Image (cartoon, coloured by chain):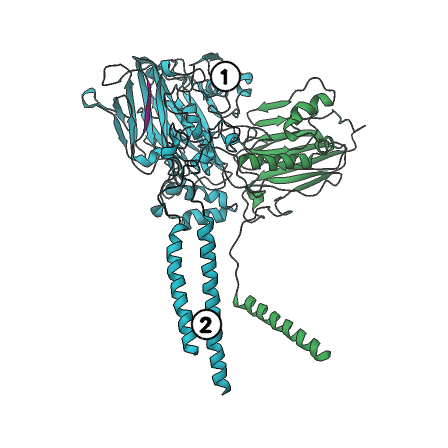
Chain colours: A cyan, B green
């Protein structure tokens, strides 16, 4: 009798389980005859879209008066048509020296009065021959003990704020633009500024270590004596030629470079970390010429608005292009801790660079689309343009120019004989390597395919992504004047690029083709609707199963209890 | 992230500034509104700048509206440098003092001495914007080793002013202090030696055998107490 009812229960349970296997496919998300429809993504200007207020302005904050051609304190400053150009007053101060410009000019900058000192025309050729440069070290997007935010803020792309360390010209006043903002002032940005000096000048570079960890300056490729005139180490390698510069201390490096070229400088303390944190910049030694007043700093690299005499002799324009890569695991360490001892431990003993991979790729401190604001190359037909390129990444850079084949004139600052020069469209740079390119905009099908908007980017493909989302990374453009809009942005025939100014896009929350001409084809499929009938059936059957299990349990325990009683 | 930070900062400024609190002007509009409100037609930021640094908004004689006269002349010397952070574990830069107390309407003359070979600042926030335009800030900046002296006059209201060095991350790494007028309005966060951080660092906890024994012992004691209570009942 008992065993019979147990058998019936087990049999009905088996049948129920079999029915469940029939119902389950209706609810587990598999597409049936009809796959779910496409989610409707509203166009970005729609008022119904909650993301709208997150989309940033294409040009950011624009300063019209900074773009025009100017003469400030007798310094000629070229027009810069991009929408976020360099501060022309700062350029005047860099050219004349902060000790020689008018107070009015200096007040239009945030520079300290001893940022760049220029004195003593020793050879009487009309330009100063004793230059004293002072650099500070700034942490961008660092942590605060006063709340869950970072400061001073510097965005490399919409919504992306990695912790960064940069060398910066010595400034004055606050590190943030005003008391109501946490945004870093214009001089505090990536990359560390390009430094330009003249061959044969006596140059002193003082590192005032305003940061909380030890640092040095190593002048990679720049002709410098191993020891300075006082017999102190001058190579900036702490375990070789002297101790590093501790927080609050300063050290002066001394050079009188005999050779010219595009070089590099970086911190040599825990180089694998400190260089990757951003303590690296381009260093240019220009040929000696009479009346050669140089723009000592090119903050943020990019277009050189006051080129040297020698460059102007052979070229129409000059650009500094600094490529960097960032591993967010390394760069977030300074945001996760505030105690310098914890940062030192995490960075040097826990973080392992050999297990790391890069997440962000920067051209002149920005990723696309921010690169369009300050690092586009604007050209006219039949121009000769000099591009100085440094690879500050820890991997190979394969720079590709659309629509152009340019000629490599220099490797690591050394001029190639004419006959050896190579014209190509992918230029390979190993880490820390520099090349000088000559870009000819002659429409001959070789050097240029004619006017247009032509990309240039790293062709090692992850270099064009931002944390794996693209288009991002170091993409920028060569834009012909006839394709340049009033606001300094390129005239595009493609889709609206403002959608890349949405932080949600780089956070991976926006479908790539969700707003294309046929969004139904490639947009985001909607989730499957849970049908009522199978839901009721499944719930009912699971309930029945549970009931049967309890019943079975009661029968078994009852019979056991009776046995024990007997 | 930055919007949140701005809100926190704006709220902080609003909180430390009773003028703004009383008139409940949003911090963003303060610059525009506060100046005509006081009937001051022309505002000039006073700058004194040379190779050794600068002084912003020095004020030796202009009285705040609530003050009939200068109540007292206070003079103090403040040192800044890495060596003053030694007594605060986990900090890198600091002043030699973290708090100053003054009477309302007093004139303070500060000799700011920089003992490092880098730039440091002694910046005071939350002052009256019409005397310290445009944002109520006073600043002494010394470019390297050396000193600068400057004066300011505080208002007649009780207030805790933020004093800090505004170089990138110097406040965060210890160069933060407070100036209290008439006892002030509480303390700021993360002032070295005075208040804790709002977002603290977490360290390893060293549970030695000794401490574990004490913990277990105390636990047993608790059991015994209950047991004893039952017996006594």
Q: Nearer the viewer, residue A301 or B177?
A: A301
Q: Position of residue A318 (x, y in %)?
A: 35, 19
State the residue position of label 1.
A64
| Residue A51 falls inside the magenta stretch | no
Give the residue displayed 37% in from the left and 38% down from the top: A468
Give the left or right position of residue A417, taking residue A528 as reference. Answer: left
Give the residue displayed 65% in from the left and 42% down from the top: B188
N-term-proximal mark, 1 vs 2: 1
Chain of the residue that carries numbered disc 2 in the rendered image: A
Q: Quadrant of the N terminus of chain A?
A: bottom left
Give the number of callouts. Answer: 2
Q: Give the residue furthest to the left.
A: A419
Both labels 1 and 2 in a single chain: yes
State the residue position of label 2.
A552
Q: Nearer the viewer, residue A49 or A250?
A: A49
Q: Position of residue A224 (x, y in %)?
A: 34, 31
Visible residue check, residue A222: no
Chain of the residue that carries numbered disc 1 in the rendered image: A
- Residue range corresponding to the magenta coloring: A452-457
Visible residue check, residue A66: yes
Task: Characterize the local packing of mark 1: few (<14), some (14-19) or many (20 or more) Cα atoms within 10 angstroms.
Answer: few
Alpha carbons under labels 1 and 2: distance apart = 83 Å
Give the residue displayed 50% in from the left and 41% down from the top: A212
């Amino acid at each position: 009798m008992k065993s019979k009812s147990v058998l019936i229960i087990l049999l009905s349970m088996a049948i129920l389980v079999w029915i469940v296997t029939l119902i389950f496919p209706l609810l587990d998300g598999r597409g049936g005859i009809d796959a779910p429809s496409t989610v409707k993504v509203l166009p970005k200007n729609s008022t119904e879209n909650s993301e709208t207020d997150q989309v940033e302005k294409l040009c950011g904050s624009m300063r019209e008066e900074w773009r025009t051609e100017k003469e400030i304190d007798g310094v000629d400053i070229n027009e810069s048509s991009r929408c976020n150009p360099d501060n022309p007053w700062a350029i005047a101060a860099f050219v004349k020296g902060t000790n020689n410009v008018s107070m009015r000019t200096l007040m239009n900058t945030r520079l300290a009065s001893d940022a760049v000192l220029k004195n003593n025309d020793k050879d009487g050729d009309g330009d100063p021959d004793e230059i004293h440069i002072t650099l500070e070290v700034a942490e961008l997007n660092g942590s605060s003990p006063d709340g869950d935010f970072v400061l001073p803020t510097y965005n490399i792309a919409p919504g992306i704020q990695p912790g960064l360390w940069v060398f910066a010209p010595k400034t004055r006043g606050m590190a943030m633009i005003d008391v109501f903002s946490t945004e870093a002032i214009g001089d505090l940005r990536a990359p560390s500024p390009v430094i330009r000096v003249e061959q044969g000048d006596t140059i002193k570079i003082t590192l005032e270590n305003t940061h909380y960890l030890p640092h040095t300056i190593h002048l990679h490729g720049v002709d410098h004596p191993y020891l300075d005139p006082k017999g102190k180490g001058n190579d900036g390698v702490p375990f070789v030629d002297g101790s590093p510069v501790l927080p609050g201390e300063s050290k002066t490096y001394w050079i009188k470079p005999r050779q010219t070229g595009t070089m590099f400088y970086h911190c040599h303390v825990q180089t694998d970390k400190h260089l990757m944190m951003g303590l690296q910049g381009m260093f240019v030694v220009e040929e000696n010429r009479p009346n050669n007043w140089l723009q000592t700093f090119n903050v943020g690299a990019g277009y050189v608005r006051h080129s040297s005499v020698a460059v102007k002799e052979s070229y129409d324009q000059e650009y500094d292009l600094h490529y960097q890569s960032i591993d967010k695991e390394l760069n977030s360490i300074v945001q996760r801790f505030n105690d310098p001892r914890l940062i030192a431990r995490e960075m040097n003993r826990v973080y392992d660079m050999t297990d790391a991979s890069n997440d962000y790729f920067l051209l002149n401190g920005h990723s696309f689309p921010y690169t369009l604001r300050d690092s586009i190359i604007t050209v006219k037909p039949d121009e000769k343009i000099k591009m100085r390129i440094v690879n500050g990444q820890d991997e190979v850079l394969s720079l590709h120019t659309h629509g152009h084949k340019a000629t490599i004139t220099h490797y690591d600052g050394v001029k190639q004989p004419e006959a050896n020069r190579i014209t190509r469209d992918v230029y390979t740079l190993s880490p820390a390597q520099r090349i000088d390119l000559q870009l000819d905009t002659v429409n001959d099908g070789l050097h240029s395919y004619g006017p247009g908007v032509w990309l240039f980017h790293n062709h090692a493909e992850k270099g064009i992504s931002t944390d794996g989302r693209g288009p991002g990374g170091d993409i920028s453009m060569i834009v012909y004047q006839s394709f340049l809009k009033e606001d300094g942005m390129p005239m595009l025939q493609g889709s609206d690029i403002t959608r890349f100014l949405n932080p949600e896009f780089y956070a991976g929350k926006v479908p790539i083709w969700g707003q294309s001409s046929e969004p139904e084809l490639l947009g985001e499929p909607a989730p499957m609707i849970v049908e009522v009938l199978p839901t009721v059936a499944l719930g009912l059957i699971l309930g029945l199963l549970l009931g049967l299990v309890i019943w079975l349990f009661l029968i078994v325990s009852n019979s056991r209890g009776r046995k024990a009683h007997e | 992230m930055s919007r949140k930070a701005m809100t926190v900062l704006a709220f902080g400024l609003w909180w430390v500034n009773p003028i703004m609190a009383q008139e409940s002007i949003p911090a963003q509009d303060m610059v525009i509104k506060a100046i005509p409100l006081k009937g001051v037609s022309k505002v000039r930021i006073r700058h004194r700048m040379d190779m050794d640094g600068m002084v912003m908004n020095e004020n030796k004689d202009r009285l705040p509206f609530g003050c009939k006269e200068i109540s007292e002349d206070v003079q103090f010397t403040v040192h800044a440098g890495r060596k003053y952070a030694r007594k605060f574990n986990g900090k890198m830069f600091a002043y030699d003092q973290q708090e100053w107390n003054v009477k309302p309407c007093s004139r303070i003359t500060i000799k700011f001495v920089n003992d490092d070979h880098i730039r440091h600042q002694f910046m005071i926030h939350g002052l009256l914007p019409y005397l310290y335009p445009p944002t109520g800030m006073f600043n002494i900046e010394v470019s390297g080793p050396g000193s600068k002296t400057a004066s300011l006059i505080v208002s007649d209201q009780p207030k805790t002013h933020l004093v800090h060095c505004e170089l990138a991350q110097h406040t965060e790494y210890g160069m933060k202090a407070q100036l209290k007028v008439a006892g002030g309005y509480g303390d700021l966060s993360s002032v070295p030696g005075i208040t804790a951080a709002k977002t603290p660092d977490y360290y390893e906890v060293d549970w030695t055998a000794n401490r574990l024994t004490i913990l277990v012992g105390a636990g047993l004691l608790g059991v015994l107490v209950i047991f004893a209570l039952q017996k006594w009942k």
